[in-house]
Amino acid sequence: MEKILSSVYEKDDIYLKYYEICSDNPPLVLIHAQGVDSESFFKVMPKLAKKYHVYAVDCYGHGGSLHDASKYNVVDIGNAVIDFIQNEIEKPVSLLGIPPVA
């Protein structure tokens, strides 16, 4: 089984915890549903890692990422994820977001 690594991306006012399974495959960024965190992907990450270098990002207010209620909005979270992709991954990615469960 591939090892899931835990890291933090921190830049200016951005603080995102993320998990990854490293490989030479193309990058895939996973965005969790509301009310859970990136650990919800732990069971599927090893399967996805057969074809992707997998990143699972905790959105603000979840898991180990920034807990600042003023940042709990789609604009700030989206900008933080974009910055993470541009400056940490530094190449085009596939992005998978999971909608909240009703």
Image: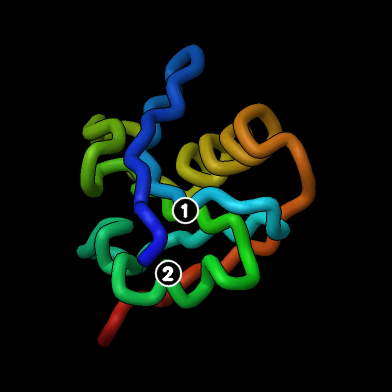
The x, y position of residue 69, in whole percent, is 24, 36
Residue at 48% x, 37% y is 76
Most extreme residue toward the right is 92
* Cα–Cα gap, marks 2 and 1: 7 Å
Badge 2 or badge 1: first in the primary sequence: 1
Most extreme residue toward the top is 12
SS for dot 1: strand
Q: Nearer the viewer, residue 35 or 23?
A: 23
Say whether marks 2 and 1 touch (CB < 8 Å).
yes
Within 10 Å of disc 1 (Cα), the crowding (few <14, some 14-19, many 20+) is: many
Quarter of the image with the N terminus is bottom left
Tell me the residue that label 2 is attached to.
46
The x, y position of residue 62, in whole percent, is 24, 48
The x, y position of residue 56, in whole percent, is 43, 54
Tell me the residue that label 1 is attached to.
21
Residue at 40% x, 60% y is 2
In the displayed structure, 14 sits above or below 61; it is above
- Is 23 left or right of 91, judged from the image as shown? left
In the displayed structure, 32 sits above or below 93; it is below
Most extreme residue toward the front is 1
Residue at 73% x, 35% y is 90
Residue at 53% x, 66% y is 49
Quarter of the image with the C terminus is bottom left
- Is 25 left or right of 13, judged from the image as shown? right
Q: Nearer the viewer, residue 76 or 21?
A: 21
Q: Amino acid at mark 1?
A: Ile
Query: Label for residue 36?
Result: none
